[in-house]
Amino acid sequence: MRIERGEYELDDDPARLDRHAIWAFLSTEAYWARWRSRSDVDAQITAAWRVVGVYERASGATVGFARAISDGVALAYLADVFIAKPARGNGLGVALVDAMIERGPGDRFRWLLHTDDAHGLYAKFGFAEPDRTYRERPRQCPPSTC
């Protein structure tokens, strides 16, 4: 899948990903991922059910990313969604989530995610607070490493 959006392009080809650029963003700018090592991020990308990258068309530079894990049948988890600061304000966040959720093989799945921001973005795609049936066991690790 390739989608052109102005000066940018979205693509779900995992071979096209610039893993260093993704790790650089996640390890320095993403409040949810700064503790991850490069090998952690590489392993997560490799194991992902689906990935979507956002690229500047002129240079090919990676300016956004999202990954999903899934059972491939009914349930998917959206993770590591970001648009780099210089590319923000171009509707790329909406385009990225749309490409992942609505334009791929999981368009009928139940989708999950954790986020501390961008609630308005995710609400456009039907994300809401969980219902009473949802339970979660938080990550188990020393506080200084999470």
Image (tube, helix red, strand yellow):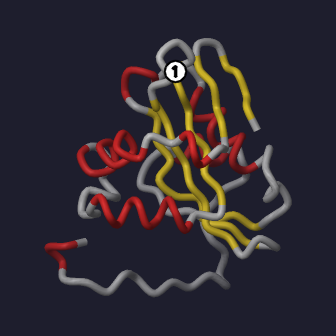
Q: Say above or below: 105 vs 17.
A: below
Single out the residue that lies furthest toward the front: 15
Image location (x, y in percent) of residue 7: 58, 13
Image location (x, y in percent) of residue 86: 38, 21
Mark 1 neighbour density, 10 Å: few (under 14) some (14–19) many (20 or more): some
**Which residue shows up at 41% across the image and 60% down it?**
42
Q: Say above or below: 30 vs 39.
A: above
Image location (x, y in percent) of residue 109: 79, 65
**Which residue shows up at 46% across the image and 57% down it?**
115
Q: Secondary structure at mark 1?
A: strand
**Which residue shows up at 50% across the image and 47% down it?**
81
The image quadrant of residue 134 is: bottom right
- Of the pair 17 and 111, the residue shown nearer to us: 17
Image location (x, y in percent) of residue 51: 60, 51
Q: In the visual, does 62 lie left or right of 49?
A: left
Q: Say above or below: 131 vs 40.
A: below
**Which residue shows up at 62% across the image and 71% down it?**
130
| Quadrant of the frame with the N terminus | top right
Residue kind at label 1, given as amino acid type: Glu
Residue marked by disc 1: 56
Q: In the visual, does 25 lie left or right of 92?
A: left
| Quadrant of the frame with the C terminus | bottom left
